[in-house]
Image: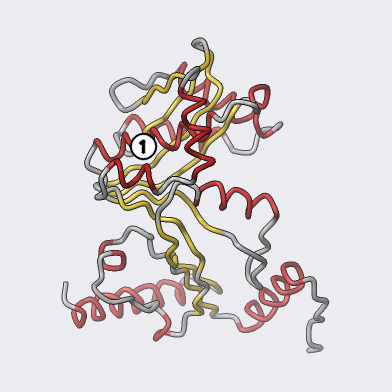
Amino acid sequence: IRYSNRNKIIEFYWKQLNKIAVEQNVEFISIKIPSLARAYLGAALPIANPFSRYGFIDLTYNTQIIDLRNSLEYLWDDVRKGHKSDIKSAAKVIKIKVWDSGSISNDKFNQYQLLHHKDAGRVTRSKKTFDLMYHWVKSGNAVLIEAALDSKPIGFALIIVYKDGAYYGSSCKDPEYNDLPASHLIQWEVIKYLKGNEVIFYDIGIQYFCQQWFRCSSEKDINISKFKRGFGGTTIPMLISEYYFSKELMRDKFLERMNKNCGLNFKKAET
């Protein structure tokens, strides 16, 4: 689609969205542009957030993209040295199995769900969410990667797949086997599997480097981001836009974020 035509489509989209929002008394809109959208990722020149011209606030996050068009040798060279060592040691004792639409079963997915609860120490997602994830695998829009030690599952990762793009969705590991780098091996096997199935780009996950006024990044968030970057790839902007019909809501939301994420103590203005 030509640049001028794309702008016309976005303008039409915004007009329809605005019409619905006004009719339904909506006060707030949030739009996320997928990191693997071809119009964005495949552009010859960097593209600014297209919704800024319509009054949206640009809240740009970062995410890590692995270009699977590169050779397997290149992808391996791009992996961090420490990760390579962990992958090699894990491969000596752990077996990897890919469960897709043709092989996934209720029993296997229940094992993933139970291990997810065990890893978190509590139930963090509703049954409806897990049912949706299972449906994605059954319909061919996701795969479940299992790491097993002596036939016992000790780690899983759910990868969302759409056309020639893939997104890291969710993962868990058995806390009783924290000494085994199962997650390292799983992610490397994910890269190999996706490349072998003609996926071009793999979004391995959002990157947090420090505190931002709009996002409180914990030390855990930052460490997980570092772990993901260890598999190589490039950090790119992920465009998120917000629009406020209510100025009072915008003021309150911004104050809440800055106080929480920046350690400030701004007070609401007297009305």
The quarter of the image holding the N terminus is bottom left
Q: Is residue 161 left or right of residue 8?
A: right
Question: Which of the two residues, 188 or 267, is positioned nearer the viewer here?
Answer: 188
Q: Position of residue 106 (x, y in %)?
A: 44, 19
Q: Which residue is mark 1?
A: 142
48 to 140, vertically: above or below: below
Question: Which of the two residues, 19 or 132, is positioned nearer the viewer here?
Answer: 132
Occupied quadrant, residue 50: bottom left
Under mark 1, the amino acid is Ala
Q: Position of residue 146 (x, y in %)?
A: 45, 25
Asked which colour scheme the image uses, the reply is secondary structure
Occupied quadrant, residue 41: bottom left
Q: Residue furthest left?
A: 2
Q: Position of residue 68 (x, y in %)?
A: 29, 48
Question: Which of the two residues, 269 or 82, is positioned nearer the viewer here?
Answer: 82
Residue at the spot 49% in from the left edge and 77% down from the top edge: 58
Question: Which of the two residues, 37 or 233, is positioned nearer the viewer here?
Answer: 233
Residue at the spot 34% in from the left edge and 79% down from the top edge: 15
Q: Is residue 236 left or right of residue 44?
A: right
245 to 142, vertically: above or below: below
Q: Residue furthest top?
A: 150
Q: Position of residue 10 (x, y in %)?
A: 30, 76
Question: Visible in this render: residue 233?
Answer: yes
Residue at the spot 78% in from the left edge and 89% down from the top edge: 271
